[in-house]
C-alpha cells in the first residue's frame, strides 16, 4: 500500500446520489434535513450546510435493487420525525425491516434511509 496518502489527508466532500431529477430530489432532501441548494454549471445539484453534504447527479439508468449505502438519521423526537418524513412523501420500506429501534423509508426515487429512535437512558 502506498505511503504517500495518509487517511488523515482524505475527507469526504459529498455523498453522491444518482437520480432521475436532481433538483427535485435535492429539494425533497432539503425539506427533510435542511441545507442550501446550489446547481453547478454541469447541472449537478449540491445540498450543503445540512448534516452531510450531498451531491445529486442525473443518471440515465434506473435503480434496480436495494441500496448498498443509506443514511441513518438520528432524531430526538422519533414520532414527529416519522410523521414529517411521511408528510413529505417518504414511503415506508417495511419489506426491508420492521422493528422498534428504527424505521426504514424510501425517498421519492426509491432510495432507502432510516430514522433512528433516540436511545432510552437508564434511570
Image (cartoon, helix red, strand yellow):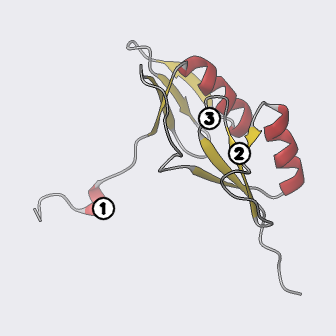
Few, some or many C-alpha atoms within 10 Å of disc 2 (few <14, some 14-19, many ≥20)?
many
Residue at mark 2: 105
Relative image position of residue 66 (x, y in whole percent): 53, 46
The residues tagged by marks 2 and 1 sit, at their Cα atoms, a distance apart of 33 Å
Residue at mark 1: 8
At horizontal 12% and vertical 59% (from top left) the residue drawn is 4
> In front here: 117 or 34?
117
Do the residues bearing badges 2 and 1 touch, measured as CB atoms within 8 Å?
Answer: no
Disc number lying in front (2 or 1): 2
Relative image position of residue 88 (x, y in whole percent): 79, 31
> In front here: 42 or 71?
71
Which part of the image, by quadrant, shows the C terminus?
Answer: bottom right
Q: Is residue 104 above or below residue 14?
A: below
Mark 2 or mark 1, which has the lower sequence index? 1
Q: Secondary structure at mark 2?
A: strand
- Which disc number belongs to residue 110? 3
Q: Secondary structure at mark 3?
A: loop
The residues tagged by marks 3 and 1 sit, at their Cα atoms, a distance apart of 34 Å
At horizontal 50% and vertical 42% (from top left) the residue drawn is 65
The answer to whether 122 appears left or right of 41 in the picture is right
The answer to whether 74 appears left or right of 58 in the picture is right
Q: Is residue 62 above or below residue 85?
A: above
Relative image position of residue 17 (x, y in whole percent): 48, 34
Q: Secondary structure at mark 1?
A: helix
Amino acid at each position: 500500500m502506498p505511503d504517500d496518502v495518509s487517511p488523515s489527508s482524505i475527507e469526504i466532500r459529498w455523498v453522491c446520489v444518482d437520480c432521475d431529477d436532481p433538483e427535485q430530489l435535492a429539494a425533497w432532501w432539503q425539506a427533510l434535513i435542511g441545507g442550501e441548494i446550489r446547481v453547478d454549471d454541469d447541472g449537478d445539484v449540491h445540498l450543503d450546510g445540512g448534516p452531510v453534504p450531498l451531491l445529486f447527479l442525473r443518471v440515465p439508468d434506473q435503480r434496480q435493487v436495494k441500496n448498498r449505502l443509506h443514511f441513518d438519521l438520528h432524531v430526538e423526537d422519533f414520532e414527529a420525525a416519522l410523521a414529517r418524513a411521511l408528510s413529505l412523501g417518504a414511503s415506508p420500506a417495511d419489506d426491508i425491516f420492521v422493528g422498534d429501534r428504527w424505521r426504514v423509508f424510501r425517498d421519492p426515487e426509491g432510495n432507502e434511509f432510516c430514522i433512528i429512535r433516540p436511545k432510552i437512558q437508564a434511570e
